[in-house]
Structures are given as structure tokens and as C-alpha cells.
């Protein structure tokens, strides 16, 4: 008597990773855990990336610049068709929130691992998304979204309370944003903001909203399958420079259970109203008075998704892939249970003591922090050239512990244990933020770095000098020999990240 064995088929035949760096490796490890064949793309300047040796296939992409190569929709689709790829994961940045890319893939018979192009269009337009949210009874900041050329525009602005912030309708990542403190500053600021918006996003429309100087930036992770939406708690993202996040944590130290429930349910309601599919993030301003206002919804995986994964034990990339394959959510809201606290620090190649100017160099030696509860998401390797071709973020240190105090202590120790020679980073600055009494007490808002700039930038040059001395010593002792094995360990499951 024989027994037939049913072999479960992979969710997709082959997935192309339309990204680079640490998020590409993160996606690859998840594909490996799901036993889905992978295709990596790369620009020739990254031909030594560890991603290429671990992916099942690796294909070079050509472009006028490295970033242009990763934005070449026609080239990516041609590679997919040539290699039999039936799904693409865009990661974050690049084409991750490009509705035209999602449509082009669909027309080619390829699944976009993300939300529908309608959701991307709706939430990618900040003016339309705000109107959509407000019409459904959710709070938005006091704002003026009419055309800036309208005769009523200035009159509407005069009714508002300064300071104001000017934002690009198609914006993101802090680009195209400016703070205005008086009506006299407005006209020039509007011109600059519209010009930047057209340059970065191809859409010159801008809007104006009240700027809350002491507000927090709190976001809620949502996950939907087009029918059901659940949340996986909130993240505190108030530590920012130039409107860009530096340190994130989950949960927020500002929320009690009542306010957490209210905020998260609002996020779920917004996502349900949009019939949202895939992972997404609903971002809010949270005032000292306990009010919250919708800011925007990001229709992709976030840079800071690891803190949610560590606290809730859910693989968000795997969830994305399963929903994209047509599977319903295998989690209910009751299954989502908070466990401890997590802190994420973005390690960037920049001079944090000199207005965060991007730094360049070559990775000479890397010693990653390790230990219980430590996750270091990186694609750094010895000999890697760090240039200004891409975003300056090099890696992410994530620490999970039973309490916020323990997570902070672990993050500080992890940063102190990190050794990165050959390129200056913001490592010392991150330590200063984490050790600051206001941060330790949870008394933070989006103006934290500006408020405490003197404390945070004191004694900065000494660290740069130490970096130069150590790098010179290393080169002298070892010439160009590269000591460390930077090959990342295979991904197995949440909680097993080179611990």
C-alpha cells in the first residue's frame, strides 16, 4: 500500500527583489524561509554585494546613474519576463509607491507585492488622502489644501495659527517641506516648495497645515487582505532630523492603553475605508493634549518595521507575500499581543556634528554588535564604497528587551560595540540621543534634536579624529587586507537575527 504525499507549492514561482541594501537582504531571507526562488538586481557599482551570492539569480541593471537603474520600469519588467518571474517585491523607496509600476507589472502578468495601484494613488496624493480621511470623520490637522494660485488661498492662510508647514502633495521622506513663521515668509516658501516638489515628485502641488511644535510623530502598522484589516500596534518616530526619522521605538512611551486603542482603531478604520491590501502604515501627529491628527499613509513596508516585528513576533514581509499570493490573513486582532519594547537606530554615513552632511568612504573593517535581543540589519561588506549615489543609511540596529529602559541600555551598548572603520557615521550622535535625560524619560517630540542640539553635538570632533586615527592604524597594520567575514547568516525566523 502506498501513501501519496502532497507537496505544497511555493506561493510564487520566482520573486524579483526590486531594491538593494539591507531591505533587499531582508526580503531575500524571507523568500528563503518560504522556499521561493529569488532574483536580485544590482548596479555594477555593487557587484560585490552579499545579496548577489545568496540570491538564486542575480542580474545587472544599467542606468545613467545607480539610482536611475533601480527606477527603470521597462528594464525590470524585461528581466522578469526573461527569467520567468511572476512577482516583484519593491521593498521601500525606489518604485515601492509607484502606482504606474504596479499597473505595468499587472499588464505584464506579474504580481506586485504590495497594495493595489488604486490605494497607492489615493494615499500617495497627500491632498486627496487628507480629504478622503476627513470626509470619513477622522481628524486631520487644520490646513489649506486649495490651489496656491487661488485668490482665496492667502485669506484662508490668514485665518490659521502660525507656525505653518508647507508640504508637497506627492511628497515623502521630508522632501519639499518647509516651516513658515509668518505671512511674510509664505510666498517665497511656497515657490521653493513647489519647485522642490516638481523636481523630486513631478508634481508641483503643495498644501499648508498648522505646525505643532511640541507634537509627536506616532504611526500605526496595519495589515489587510482587502476584506479584513488588523493593526500591530504603534511606533514612536519623533526623533527626526530634517523631517527624517533617526530613532524609532515600539510601543510609544506616550500612550496608555485607552489612547493606544483609540489611535490604532482610527488607523484600522482609515485602512478599511480604503479597502486596503498588504502592509501599510498610518501616520499621526500626537499633541501634548492627547489629540491626534492623520498625516499620511505609507503604502509599503517601512524602514522601521523591525521594531514591530520584534515586539509582536510577526514577519511583516512574509505577511505581504502571502496576501499578494491571494491568501487571506492568517491572523486575527486577538492574536496580536505586545511583548516588551524595541528600539531601532538608523546608522547613517553622515556628519551629525556638522549639519548631517553625507559622508563617503570605504568600509575597511566591520564588527557588528551581537547578543541577546540584538538584530543588525545590514548589507555592509569589506571593501564597499560608500558614496552619495544612494540614501546615507548604512544599517539598522534593533534591540528588543522586556522594558524600555532595558532596550535603551541594550541599544547604547550595541552602538558602543559596533566597529566600522573607513567611513564616518552618526553612531556617536545616536548614543548621545539615547543617553539624554529627556529621551530616557520619554519626554520627546519632533523638535527634540533642534531643542537639544547643543547637548547632542558637544564634543563631536573628537569622535571624527578617533575614526581617522583608527582607520589609518588599520591600513598601516594590515594594508588593504580585509579581516572580517561580512556574509550575513541565513534568515530563519523572527527572533533569530545573528543573536
Image (cartoon, helix red, strand yellow):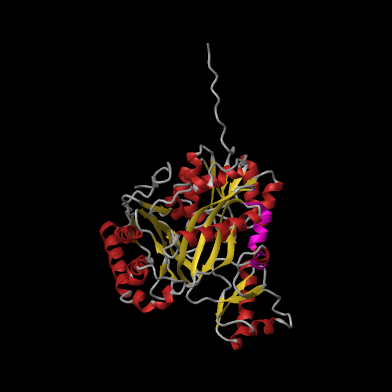
User: Can you say whether 315 is above or below 11 in the image?
Assistant: below
At a point 25% along the width and 59% down the height, the residue shown is: 477
Q: Nearer the viewer, residue 106 or 401?
A: 401
Q: Which quadrant of the figure has residue 407? A: bottom left
Residue 204 on the magenta span: no
Q: Where in the figure is residue 264, as x and y percent of width and height?
A: 53, 58
Q: Where in the figure is residue 209, as x and y percent of width and height?
A: 60, 75
User: Can you say whether 454 is above or below 301 in the image?
Assistant: below
Q: How many marks?
A: 0
Q: Which quadrant of the figure has residue 380? A: bottom left
Tell me which segment is drawn in magenta: 115-130
Q: Residue furthest right?
A: 151
At a point 44% along the width and 55% down the height, the residue shown is: 307
Q: Nearer the viewer, residue 196 or 158?
A: 158
Instruction: Please indicate, yes or no, whether residue 95 appears anywhere in the rendered image.
Output: no
Q: Residue furthest bottom?
A: 184
Instruction: Please indicate, yes or no, whether residue 73 appears anywhere in the rendered image.
Output: yes
Q: Tell me the chief SS of the magenta region.
A: helix
Q: Nearer the viewer, residue 331 or 305?
A: 331
Q: Where in the figure is residue 97, as x and y percent of width and height?
A: 61, 58
Q: Where in the figure is residue 426, as x and y percent of width and height?
A: 38, 67
Q: Nearer the viewer, residue 373 or 339?
A: 339
At a point 53% along the width and 43% down the height, the residue shown is: 331
Q: Residue furthest front?
A: 258
Residue 120 on the magenta span: yes
Amino acid at each position: 500500500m502506498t501513501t501519496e504525499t502532497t507537496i505544497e507549492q511555493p506561493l510564487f514561482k520566482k520573486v524579483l527583489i526590486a531594491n538593494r541594501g539591507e531591505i533587499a537582504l531582508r526580503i531575500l531571507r524571507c523568500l528563503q524561509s518560504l522556499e521561493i526562488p529569488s532574483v536580485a538586481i544590482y548596479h555594477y557599482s555593487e557587484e560585490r554585494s552579499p545579496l548577489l551570492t545568496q540570491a538564486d539569480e542575480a542580474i545587472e541593471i544599467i542606468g545613467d546613474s545607480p539610482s536611475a537603474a533601480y527606477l527603470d520600469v521597462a528594464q525590470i519588467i524585461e528581466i522578469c519576463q526573461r527569467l520567468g518571474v511572476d512577482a516583484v517585491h519593491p521593498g521601500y523607496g525606489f518604485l515601492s509607491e509607484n502606482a504606474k509600476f504596479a499597473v505595468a507589472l499587472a499588464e505584464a502578468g506579474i504580481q506586485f507585492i504590495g497594495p493595489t495601484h488604486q490605494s497607492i494613488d489615493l494615499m500617495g496624493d497627500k491632498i486627496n488622502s487628507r480629504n478622503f480621511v476627513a470626509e470619513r470623520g477622522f481628524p486631520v490637522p487644520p490646513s489649506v489644501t486649495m490651489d496656491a494660485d487661488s485668490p482665496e488661498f492667502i485669506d484662508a492662510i490668514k485665518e490659521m495659527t502660525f507656525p505653518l508647514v508647507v508640504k508637497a502633495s506627492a511628497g515623502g521622506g521630508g522632501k519639499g517641506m518647509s516651516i513658515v513663521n509668518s505671512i511674510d515668509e509664505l510666498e517665497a516658501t511656497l515657490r521653493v516648495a513647489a519647485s522642490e516638489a516638481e523636481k523630486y515628485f513631478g508634481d508641483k502641488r503643495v498644501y499648508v497645515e498648522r505646525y505643532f511644535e511640541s507634537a509627536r510623530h506616532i504611526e500605526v502598522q496595519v495589515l489587510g487582505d482587502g476584506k479584513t484589516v488588523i493593526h500591530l500596534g504603534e511606533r514612536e518616530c519623533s526623533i527626526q532630523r530634517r523631517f527624517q526619522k533617526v530613532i524609532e521605538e515600539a510601543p510609544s512611551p506616550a500612550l496608555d492603553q485607552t489612547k493606544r486603542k483609540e489611535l490604532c482603531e482610527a488607523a484600522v478604520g482609515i485602512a478599511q475605508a480604503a479597502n486596503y491590501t498588504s502592509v501599510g502604515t498610518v501616520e499621526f501627529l500626537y499633541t501634548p493634549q492627547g489629540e491626534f491628527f492623520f498625516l499620511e499613509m505609507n503604502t509599503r513596508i517601512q524602514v522601521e518595521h523591525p521594531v514591530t516585528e520584534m515586539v509582536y513576533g510577526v514577519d511583516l514581509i512574509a505577511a505581504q507575500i502571502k496576501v499578494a499570493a491571494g491568501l487571506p490573513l492568517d491572523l486575527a486582532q486577538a492574536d496580536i499581543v505586545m511583548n516588551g519594547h524595541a528600539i531601532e537606530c538608523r546608522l547613517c554615513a553622515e556628519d551629525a556634528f556638522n549639519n548631517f552632511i553625507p559622508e563617503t568612504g570605504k568600509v575597511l573593517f566591520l564588527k557588528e554588535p551581537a547578543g541577546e535581543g540584538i538584530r543588525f540589519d545590514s548589507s555592509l561588506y569589506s571593501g564597499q564604497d560608500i558614496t552619495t549615489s544612494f540614501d546615507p543609511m548604512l544599517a539598522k540596529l534593533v534591540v528588543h528587551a522586556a522594558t524600555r529602559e532595558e532596550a535603551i541600555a541594550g541599544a547604547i551598548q550595541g552602538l558602543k560595540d559596533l566597529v566600522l572603520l573607513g567611513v564616518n557615521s552618526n553612531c556617536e550622535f545616536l548614543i548621545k540621543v539615547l543617553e539624554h535625560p529627556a529621551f530616557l524619560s520619554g519626554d520627546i517630540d519632533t523638535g527634540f534634536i533642534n531643542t537639544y542640539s547643543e547637548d547632542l553635538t558637544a564634543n563631536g570632533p573628537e569622535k571624527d579624529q578617533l575614526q581617522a586615527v583608527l582607520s589609518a592604524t588599520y591600513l598601516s597594520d594590515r594594508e588593504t587586507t580585509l579581516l572580517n567575514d561580512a556574509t550575513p547568516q541565513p534568515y530563519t525566523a523572527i527572533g533569530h537575527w545573528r543573536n
